[in-house]
């Protein structure tokens, strides 16, 4: 994930890596809690959870409001801190449910202030714990959190590191919201303990001001969990992030685009990357299923679209592949009639990737052409390259862990056979 303008010439990654800070998590590694989580539930579901531990019907609404405040305004991760909830109820809740944060495997801080967390979640059917990555990008006047929606991805975009990892499983709503809570915790972005219970805490001055679903995975292939999570993240009495500050990025799952607009109402970004079907079929293979025309038609009818609410088209700059001025001309043509912003993303290389980033001069020429046609087309500065946190560089260890598992199983079998 990468944000902001002013691209500097390619930095020397090795030098950057030397300066990168790798810090051990200050959080004690907590054992993965298998109890159901109260994070990410709707108010109604939270009410059902309270009823299940014996809270009387007439008290449910009040208790839900209290819990909501503790969880999402104050950001507490321990029932014991819920000062205005009776000890008896706190104990009942903590024996049946968890509100623990995801386990931090590593926390890395880039020389440019970008932070990346590798987070571990319980298996939930995947066989063993899974790992994903979450990235925080601080900028002048804003801070963007890049959130993952899946462990791996079913899609295989050829320039994307996540695309080389097969899908291990979808994340659940609590795991998606958990990434936001954890980032705010680690950044000290929740009000301190001295804030009175129930107080209204203004959203100004926060460190996490924006959320982008641009981490690992295709969010529209995990629709229900992403929808539930974003409803919690945008809830005005909790985390209270405006829907205009939440962006969902899709590679082009056409049948889900209108539904996302209607049911989630967040800002939309499309990973376009090519302006003809032949090339897009190769770079973004979902294009074979939902070709450009269908994708652009879905964009044209995206609910709530206006000049004030534009769709962002992401375009990764691949040297000699999609970066000619003819491509720029066609880009302007195919987007005609769609209120759009174009983000030019310098390709972020990863070990084994088959592409090169376009030359800086060529990116500028491309951007000039698109600008002259009237589109804002910022070139995104790659952020956190030294800690492999930039757009498309996220890839978790989960698959490798599984392979290791398979290998040790295999070894055990061989030993058994040899012994038998
Ligand atoms: N699956 C979703 C969201 C995650 S990817 C999607 O594809 O939209 C977030 C953005 O990073 C997408 O635009 C993706 O195409 C881009 N990206 C992937 N790999 C990249 C790389 N190596 N360099 C630059 N951008 C990349
Ligand atoms: Fe999946 Fe998006 Fe990467 Fe494509 S670009 S492989 S859809 S994460």
Image (cartoon, helix red, strand yellow):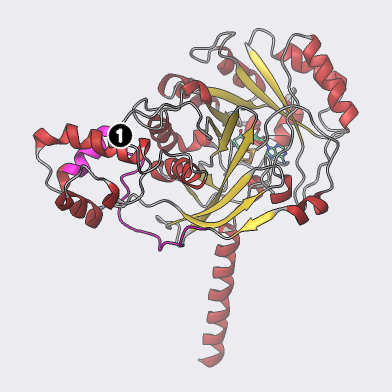
Q: Residue at x 78, y 28 (%)?
A: 6
In the displayed structure image, the side of residue 347 where residue 50 appears, left or right: left
* Placement of 4 over or under 153, stated as above or below: above
In which quadrant of the rendered image does the N terminus lie? top right
Image x and y of residue 81, in percent = 29, 49
* Placement of 213 over or under 54, stated as above or below: above
Residue assigned mark 1: 42
Q: Residue at x 69, y 42 (%)?
A: 160
Q: Quadrant of residue 348?
A: top right
Magenta span: 26-50
Image x and y of residue 69, in percent = 30, 35
Closer to the camera, 296 or 339?
339
Q: Quarter of the picture for ligand 2? A: top right
Residue 42 among those drawn in magenta: yes
- Mark 1: give few (<14), some (14-19) or many (20+) Cα within 10 Å: some
SS for dot 1 = loop
Closer to the camera, 397 or 324?
397
In the displayed structure image, the side of residue 325 where residue 79 appears, left or right: left
Q: Is residue 326 visible?
A: yes
Give the residue at the far bottom of this rendering.
419
Closer to the camera, 300 or 77?
77
Image x and y of residue 33, in percent = 36, 59
Q: Residue at x 36, y 35 (%)?
A: 73
């Amino acid at each position: 994930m990468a944000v902001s303008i002013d691209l500097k010439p390619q930095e020397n990654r090795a030098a950057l890596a030397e300066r990168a800070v790798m810090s051990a998590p200050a959080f004690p590694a907590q054992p993965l809690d298998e109890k159901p989580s109260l994070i990410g539930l709707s108010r109604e579901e939270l009410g059902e959870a309270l009823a299940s531990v014996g809270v009387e019907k007439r008290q449910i609404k009040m208790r839900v409001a209290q819990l909501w405040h503790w969880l999402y305004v104050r950001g507490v991760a321990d029932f014991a801190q819920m000062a205005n909830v009776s000890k008896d109820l706190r104990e009942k809740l903590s024996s049946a449910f968890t509100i623990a944060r995801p386990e931090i495997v590593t926390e890395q801080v880039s020389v440019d202030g970008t932070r990346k967390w590798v987070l571990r979640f319980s298996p939930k059917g995947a066989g063993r714990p899974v790992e994903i990555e979450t990235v925080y990008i601080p900028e002048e006047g804003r801070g963007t959190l890049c959130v993952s929606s899946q462990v791996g991805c079913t899609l295989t975009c050829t320039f994307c590191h996540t695309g080389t990892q097969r899908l291990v499983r979808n994340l659940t709503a609590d795991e998606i919201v958990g990434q936001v809570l954890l980032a705010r915790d680690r950044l000290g972005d929740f009000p301190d303990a001295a804030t009175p219970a129930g107080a209204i805490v203004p959203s100004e001055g926060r460190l996490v001001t924006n959320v982008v679903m641009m981490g690992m995975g295709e969010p529209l292939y995990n629709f229900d969990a992403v929808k539930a999570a974003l409803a919690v993240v945008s809830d005005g009495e909790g985390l209270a992030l405006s829907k205009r500050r939440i962006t969902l990025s899709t590679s082009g799952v056409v049948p889900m685009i209108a539904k996302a607009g209607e049911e989630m109402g967040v800002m939309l970004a499309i990973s376009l990357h090519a302006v003809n079907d032949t090339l897009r079929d190769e770079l973004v293979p979902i294009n074979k299923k939902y070709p450009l025309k269908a994708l652009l038609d879905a964009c044209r009818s995206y609910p709530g679209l206006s000049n004030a609410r534009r769709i962002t088209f992401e375009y990764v700059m691949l040297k000699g592949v999609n970066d000619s001025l003819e491509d720029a001309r066609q880009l302007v043509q195919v987007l005609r009639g769609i209120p759009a912003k174009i983000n030019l993303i310098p390709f972020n290389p990863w070990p084994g990737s088959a592409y090169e980033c376009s030359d800086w001069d060529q990116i500028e020429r491309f951007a000039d052409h698109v600008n002259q046609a009237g589109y804002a087309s910022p070139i995104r500065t790659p952020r956190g390259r030294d800690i492999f946190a930039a757009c498309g560089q996220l890839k978790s260890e989960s698959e490798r862990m599984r392979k290791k598992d398979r290998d040790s199983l295999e070894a055990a079998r061989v030993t058994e056979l040899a012994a038998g």
